[in-house]
Amino acid sequence: MKNKFRSNLIKNLLLFCITLIIFCILLEIALRIAWHNPYAHAKADHILWIRRHNPGLNLQLNRRAIDKENPRIKFEVDERSFIKPSKRFSDPDYNIVFIGGSTTECLAVTDSLRFHNIVSLELEKKGIKVNALNIGHEGNTMQDALNILLNHILIDPPDYIVLMHNCNDVGLLRFFPNYFTRMGWTVNLRSIQRWMAQILSGKIYSLGFVKQKIDYTLRIMAYDKAIDDKHHEKWLEFDERLVEIQSRIYKYRSRLESFIDICRNFDISPILMTQPLASFESETSPLWLEESLQIQFNGIIREVCAEKGAILIDLEKYIYNIELDIGKPNAFFYDEVHINDKGSVVYGKYIAERINEELENAKSQDAQKSTITLENDTSEIPNEP
């Protein structure tokens, strides 16, 4: 009796489902014939990916390939997506944000030796309390810097922003005629999968384990592609387009100029840095790098700073002038553009020195303005009754 009841129930459920499907199909056909769908050709909303690290990220990394003696390092991110160490002082004299790509991110550098932290430590020795906040992210370009500035940093604007963008812009503009790939895209299943993976990996540890392995594998695959012959042939095709890229350079320059203007409109002092390039190649060196273009883009940074009156930290010139064997792997860089611990300390000390000079200049100018104001104050003191 029970088996018969169960069988009838299953048949009725199947019949209901089939009927419902047929009804939906007929309804769809009828609506397509008799109804105008205002959304028929409309696409989904565009989304903009703010390319910064997820708040609260805590990675344990193995850098054995570049430092066998100290292979394990930490990479942590605070609640505002700034790479730790971040907010060292609760009442800083200045907040300074460092923004750039992987050369600013310093993923493979010991956490306490990342150059933004060295800047904070060096300025503290001079009696200046600075929260040096690093929001670098691998692969970022000038377009990403503008996105991060407008949609993230301006929530609580810093006193200074130190910008270093160059080689990723060279790479992107060798691929594409403009920065459209960093300007948002239509919501799709891949976007939803990405967000779901980010959310669930923190809730379900087994998924977090899988996501970590996938992320690590994708990073390794990216390096494999860089040395794979088939991909290398594709890169060689871009060398024929070096003339074409000259017509795209203004798109990089205009973004530099816009970045400076936006910062000033929100009372932030912009500082631009040139980006050094080592004189050797390794298996992890990005193949989109082109020394002549790198030099040219650094020249644009200098020109823009001169024309706009912005602060320049000429890191490229400094590195080439000091007595360091930058042509020797791991002496300073572990590949063509990425610094190791030693290089990060050298970066940090020089940047701190230049920032200190600018802070002293700003104080001196403020003092002069105050003096001029007092000298020009000709208002008469009212007579006593």
Image (cartoon, rainbow, N blue to C red):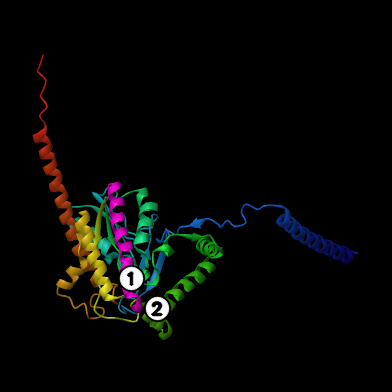
Say if mark 2 contacts mark 1, CB within 8 Å.
Answer: no
* Residue extending furthest toward the top: 385
Label 1: few (<14), some or many (≥20) within 10 Å? many
Instruction: Please name whichever residue, 249 or 262, is drawn nearer the observer in this view of the structure.
Output: 249
Residue 300 located within the stretch drawn in magenta: no
The relative height of residue 176 versus residue 29 in the rendered view (above or below) is: below
Percent coordinates x, y for residue 183 in the rendering:
43, 60
Bounds of the magenta segment: 239-268
Image coordinates of residue 287 in percent, x first then y, are: 35, 78
* Residue closest to the eye, 80 or 263: 263
Which residue is tagged 2?
A: 223
Q: Secondary structure at mark 2?
A: helix
Q: Quadrant of the C terminus?
A: top left
Q: Residue furthest right?
A: 1
Residue, disc 1: 245
Residue occupying image coordinates x 37% and y 52%: 150
Within the image, what quadrant is residue 1 found in?
bottom right
Q: Position of residue 299 (x, y in %)?
A: 22, 66
Residue at the image position 16 percent from the left and 49 percent from the top: 362
Question: Mark 2 and mark 1: span between their CA atoms?
Answer: 25 Å
Amino acid carrying mark 2 in the image: Tyr
Question: In the displayed structure, does residue 185 sit left or right of residue 319?
Answer: right
Q: Residues within 10 Å of mark 2 (few under 14, many from 20)?
A: some
